[in-house]
Amino acid sequence: MSENRKVFVKTYGCQMNVYDSERMVAALGPTGYTQTDRVEDADMILLNTCHIREKAAEKVYSELGRLKPLKRDNPDLVIGVAGCVAQAEGEEILRRQPLVDLVVGPQAYHRLPALEQAARAGAKPVDTEFPEEDKFSHLPRGPKMRRAPSAFLTVQEGCDKFCAFCVVPYTRGAEVSRPAERILDEARDLVDRGVREITLLGQNVNAYHGPASGGEWSLAQLIGALADIDGLLRIRFTTSHPNDMQDDLIEAFGSSEKLMPYLHLPVQSGSDRILKAMNRRHTAQNYIDLIERIRTARPDLLLSGDFIVGFPGETEADFQDTLRLVEAVGYGQAYSFKYSARPGTPAAERDEVSDVDKTDRLARLQALLSAQQKAAQEAMVGREVKVLFEKTGRQSGQLVGKSEYLHAVHATCDSARIGAVVPVRITSAAPNSLAGEVI
Ligand code: SAH
Ligand code: SF4
Ligand code: F3S
């Protein structure tokens, strides 16, 4: 193996990118690379980019511009662009920013060692091909390093839903599920390394239908098999589409002790007209009924969602429908965005709602969602939750972790209990975290 080299990875966007960044470092391991968090020490810099927000590509170009002095000081530095902007822009990145040495799309990370070599030889490779087989299957596992108690595991990638506003079907490609046995192997390996909670990842994770013994498994079947792993205490999954919430998955919320009572289920809008224009393929009432069924299975479920305001054609009346849906459903936590046109998506031709209206609607929606979140946080005071402690907190003697509902919780506790699930009585609530006492 070659000399000791260092790679610096900067990650933008969703959890899938966080996961992929880890895999890129792992893929480069056998070629002599270890990760550094000091950009000035790096022999290679990778920007793992996200394309979901407006001007995402522009921001990547200005970030790249800032790397110029580093390249000047170290001509051997390899600069790579990965992630969804890499997939969307491809060759264009090399044209616009000559200091980039390689471009790699999310489906080609297993080829990174070869791309790095080609880049060192001066080739400027661009790889945005989609592979025929599981891109994670031939990744080296490396030495059995201890891991933090909570980890992500990709089970599904890509999306066939084609919501009219979204780039993901173009940047991540068609929906592909990983074979169940590979996922189980990876999960066992994570548990051996100290992981106690696994969050299954996918752009449309509940559409999972992976090859398995006896045919195909649904996400609920996969969760059932994962739950049999000793030492794995908690299972979560994200992100889901309402139309893929199958009966067995809803039942799992009631029957599986390891599946945590938290669900991120984006609805985007409460207006049937806008939902139709968004190509979401369900109505507001379908969603409300679905939530009711899930809450029947798991009454204490904490629900999270995503909303877009100002989608082309959205009127004040449509927006009022969204507010009504939020009132009817009740969220413990949520993300909301102003619509922004993504080039290449069907909705991008039209961007009709003025920014003034978007800003106004977003403020009103966020006021409602924050009030719901605040009430949900305050309702936790006095309650007992089970916290998986993940790390030490800011104050000495303090640990922080997550409740079963994914609240961030801090409490005074012995650091030996990092990785353990500990009962905690909540004593106070802040907007984004809870404080408590170990029982
Ligand atoms: N696969 C996931 C999320 C994909 S992107 C899902 O289906 O929920 C995360 C969120 O970004 C979306 O839920 C949506 O609310 C928001 N988003 C995506 N494209 C957007 C756009 N063009 N403008 C504004 N928000 C957008
Ligand atoms: Fe994008 Fe999610 Fe719609 Fe797929 S389901 S197109 S990832 S918003
Ligand atoms: Fe962004 Fe790509 Fe994830 S566009 S949200 S990094 S799938």
Image (cartoon, helix red, strand yellow):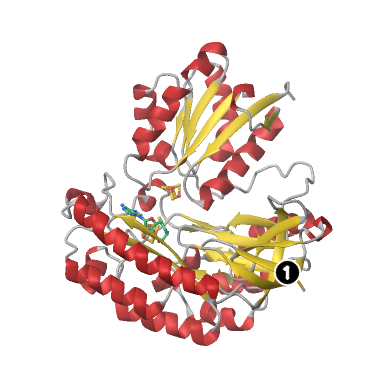
| Residue 416 visible here | yes
| Residue 89 visible here | no
Look at 18% across and 67% down and name the residue there.
316
Look at 34% across and 24% down and name the residue there.
96
Q: Quadrant of the N terminus?
A: top right
Look at 43% across and 80% down and name the residue there.
291
Report helix, strand or loop for mark 1. strand
Q: Amino acid at mark 1?
A: Glu
Q: Position of residue 103 (x, y in %)?
A: 46, 31
- In the foreground, 436 or 391: 436
Mark 1 crowdedness (10 Å alpha carbons): few <14, some 14-19, many ≥20: some
Q: Position of residue 39 (x, y in %)?
A: 59, 27
Q: Position of residue 276 (x, y in %)?
A: 23, 68
Furthest residue toward bottom: 296
Q: Which residue is mark 1?
A: 437
Q: Is residue 411 left or right of residue 154?
A: right
